[in-house]
């Protein structure tokens, strides 16, 4: 019995040694590398409701969303409400033009390096002649859908993300000029790039018109559209709110989809926007914004 007992003890020891040899040491385990979150994608169903809401605002306030009108004030309140619900820190920046009070809407996403800001904007006002759903409800909606996508994804960008909707652009870039003029020298220095979007849903678009100034942003837009086989055309600084920033030495980029068949008229309604074009544009805004903020 004793010999069998010793044999059993020997076998147990040998089994334990084999088990220890079979288990890899913790020190040899591969380090876990966190994955970079994928860039979200926005669907047509996620962006078009914002345009329909702006059309509804115009319909119930006299047919437009121009500076100094109830249409603009209600557009402002609508966009601010969406952003507040999404967790942004929002604020209205007042200015006066032609004796009429106007506002810019600024929305900051919490986090990111405040010394390096990626600012994304569009003008929210229309002309008095019509509701301005393409010019520039489309750009406003693309920027809003991008902001909401950032919130839904719980983004934690390296750079600080700020979104803006300008007032009185149709009066001569008044809102964005006022914002830039009130920035301190240090405040201007903190903005690494301003991205502007004015008309992003034009029907029968022939090519996306890309603002060429800030190289990384420009290259990112060109690469995005090239990957989809979409033609682009290079444009310089001017013609919309990016001019206010470029004139102050702040790097700018962005794009638009051209004038289309109806501009600054009553016909610039929801059916003047092509949903597919608007969706492609929105995802371009989101993709490039995400890339720049992550660097």
Image: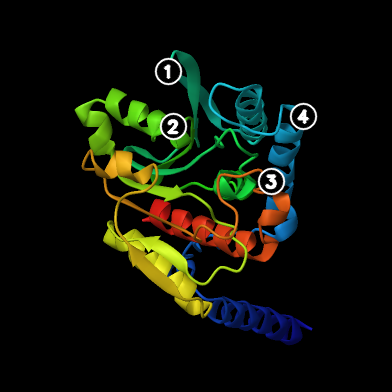
Q: Quadrant of residue 261?
A: bottom right
Q: Going from the N terminus, do you reach mark 4 or mark 1 first?
A: 4
Task: Give the x, y percent position of residue 226.
Answer: 46, 77
Distance from Cα at disc 4 to Cα at disc 1: 25 Å
Q: Secondary structure at mark 3?
A: helix
Of callouts 4 and 3, the N-terminal one? 3
SS at circle 1? loop
- Mark sitting earlier along the chain (2/4): 4
Q: Earlier in the sequence, mark 3 or mark 1?
A: 3
Q: Which quadrant, please, contains the C terminus?
A: bottom left
Observer-side mark, 2 or 3, equals 2
Label pair 2/1, CB-CB below 8 angstroms: yes
Q: What residue would you read off at disc 2?
A: 171
Distance from the alpha carbon under mark 3 to that under mark 1: 28 Å
**Quarter of the N terminus within the rendering:** bottom right
Q: Which residue is mark 3?
A: 51
| Residue 149 drawn above or below residue 101 | below
Residue 60's tag is: 4
Which of the two discs, 4 and 3, sits closer to the camera? 4
Which residue position holds label 1?
98
> How many residues crowd mark 1 within 10 Å: few (<14), some (14–19), many (20+)?
few
Q: Nearer the viewer, mark 4 or mark 1?
A: 1
Tell me if residue 203 comes above or below residue 167 in the rendering. below
Residue in view at x 44 percent, y 32 percent: 171
Residue 29 shows in this picture: no
């Amino acid at each position: 019995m004793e010999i069998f007992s010793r044999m059993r003890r020997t076998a147990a020891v040998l089994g334990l040694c084999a088990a220890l040899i079979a288990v890899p040491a913790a020190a040899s385990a591969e380090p876990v590398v966190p994955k970079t979150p994928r860039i979200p994608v926005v669907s047509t169903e996620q962006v078009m409701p914002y345009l329909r809401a702006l059309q509804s605002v115009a319909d119930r306030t006299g047919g437009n969303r121009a500076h100094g009108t109830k249409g603009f004030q209600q557009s402002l309140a609508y966009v601010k409400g969406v952003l507040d619900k999404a967790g942004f820190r929002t604020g209205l920046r007042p200015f006066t033009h032609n004796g009429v009070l106007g506002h810019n809407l600024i929305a900051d996403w919490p986090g990111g390096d405040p010394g390096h800001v990626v600012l994304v904007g569009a003008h929210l006002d229309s002309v008095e002649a019509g509701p301005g759903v393409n010019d520039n409800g489309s750009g406003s909606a693309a920027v809003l859908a991008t902001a909401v996508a950032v919130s839904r994804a719980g983004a934690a960008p390296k750079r600080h993300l700020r979104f803006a909707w300008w007032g009185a652009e149709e009066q001569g870039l008044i809102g964005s000029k006022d914002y830039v003029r009130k920035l301190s020298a240090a405040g201007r220095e903190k903005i690494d790039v301003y991205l502007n979007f004015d008309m992003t849903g034009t029907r029968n678009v022939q090519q996306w018109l890309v603002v060429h100034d800030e190289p990384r942003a420009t290259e990112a837009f060109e690469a995005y559209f090239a990957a989809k086989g979409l033609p682009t055309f290079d444009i310089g600084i001017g013609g919309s709110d990016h001019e206010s920033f470029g004139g102050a030495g702040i790097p700018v980029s962005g794009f638009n989809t051209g004038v289309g068949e109806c501009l600054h008229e009553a016909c610039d309604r929801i059916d003047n926007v092509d949903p597919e074009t608007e969706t492609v544009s929105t995802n371009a805004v989101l993709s490039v914004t995400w890339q720049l903020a992550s660097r």
